[in-house]
């Protein structure tokens, strides 16, 4: 992108008091030393203008027990899978939209398994909530969990939940994929069904989370 060799060095800039430098600190540091600075959002904006990892491949109405949704299908050019988005009502970028980005979990979504520990939105509950408000988006991401990993999770259903069940790189990939789909659908402001997203690059997709809605269970 910069016209140099495709190599880089990752460093951690520290403040004089030993704390990690945040963006305001880094902007002052860059100005002082004449260094150009770019943000993750800048990089995402650039990549979105030059490449896309998902492409829309289909669109149709889908009657469900919760009402009729508009079903959008997307091909994942990186993973090779197919993702879906179920949309109800008119989506406008400036109007807050109820949104759930959901990774398919066969144990919860197909057979209704209940996990030990804090509850989170199931696919069924998310669709039901969107239908109640008659407007919103549920993005359904294909699961890339192996058969062996699924089998290993079954005995854990009655055990205390692990803090991280997926790698951070996988989580970032899922958030990025979901964000691209939301951007394609014209979503701008999110009323997010779920806990706060720990992902700094959402602004690069022109997305803003204005509310996080926990599962009521």
Image (tube, grey):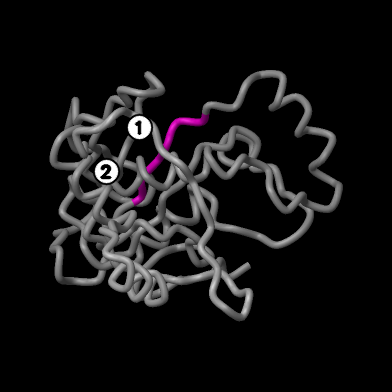
In this rendering, the answer to whether 168 lies above or below 20 is: above
Rendered image: mark on residue 181:
2
Q: Is residue 133 visible?
A: no
Tell me, yes or no, whether the highlighted magenta stretch contains residue 26.
no
Q: Which segment did they paint magenta?
A: 138-143
User: Looking at this view, is 198 or 126 the one in front?
Assistant: 198
Tell me, yes or no, whether the highlighted magenta stretch contains residue 141.
yes
**Which quadrant is the N terminus positioned in?**
top left
Residue at x 45% of width, y 31% of height: 142
Q: Provide the major secondary structure of the magenta segment.
A: strand
**Quadrant location of residue 180?**
top left
Label 1 CA crowd tier, 10 Å (few <14, some 14–19, many 20+): many
Residue at x 45% of width, y 63% of height: 193
Q: Secondary structure at mark 1?
A: strand
**Which quadrant is the C terminus positioned in?**
bottom right
Rendered image: mark on residue 83:
1
Q: Residue 157: where, in percent of width, then height?
A: 79, 43
User: Looking at this view, is 126 or 2 the one in front?
Assistant: 2
Cβ–Cβ under 8 Å for marks 1 and 2? yes
> Which residue is at the far bottom?
17
Label 2 CA crowd tier, 10 Å (few <14, some 14–19, many 20+): many
Q: Earlier in the sequence, mark 1 or mark 2?
A: 1
Residue at x 51% of width, y 63% of height: 13
Q: On the picture, is 131 further left or further right than 68? A: right
Rendered image: mark on residue 148:
none
User: Looking at this view, is 131 or 26 the one in front?
Assistant: 26
């Amino acid at each position: 992108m910069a016209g140099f060799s495709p190599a880089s060095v990752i460093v951690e800039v520290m403040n004089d008091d030993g704390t990690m430098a945040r963006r305001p600190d880094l902007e002052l540091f860059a100005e002082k030393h004449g260094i150009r600075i770019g943000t993750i959002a800048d990089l995402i904006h650039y990549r979105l203008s030059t490449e896309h990892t998902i492409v829309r491949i289909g669109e149709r109405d889908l009657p469900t027990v919760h009402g009729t949704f508009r079903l959008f299908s997307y091909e994942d050019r990186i993973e090779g899978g197919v993702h879906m988005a179920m949309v109800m009502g008119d989506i406008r970028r400036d109007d807050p939209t109820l949104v759930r980005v959901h990774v398919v979990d066969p144990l919860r979504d197909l057979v209704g398994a209940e996990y030990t520990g804090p509850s989170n939105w199931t696919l069924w509950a998310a669709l039901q909530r969107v239908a109640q408000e008659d407007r919103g988006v549920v993005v359904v991401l294909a699961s890339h969990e192996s058969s062996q990993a699924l089998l290993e999770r079954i005995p854990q259903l009655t055990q205390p939940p692990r803090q991280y069940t997926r790698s951070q790189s996988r989580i970032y990939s899922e958030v990025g994929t979901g964000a691209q789909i939301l951007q394609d659908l014209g979503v701008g402001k999110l009323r997010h069904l779920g806990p706060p997203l720990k992902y700094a690059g959402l602004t690069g997709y022109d997305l803003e989370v204005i509310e996080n809605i926990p599962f009521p269970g």
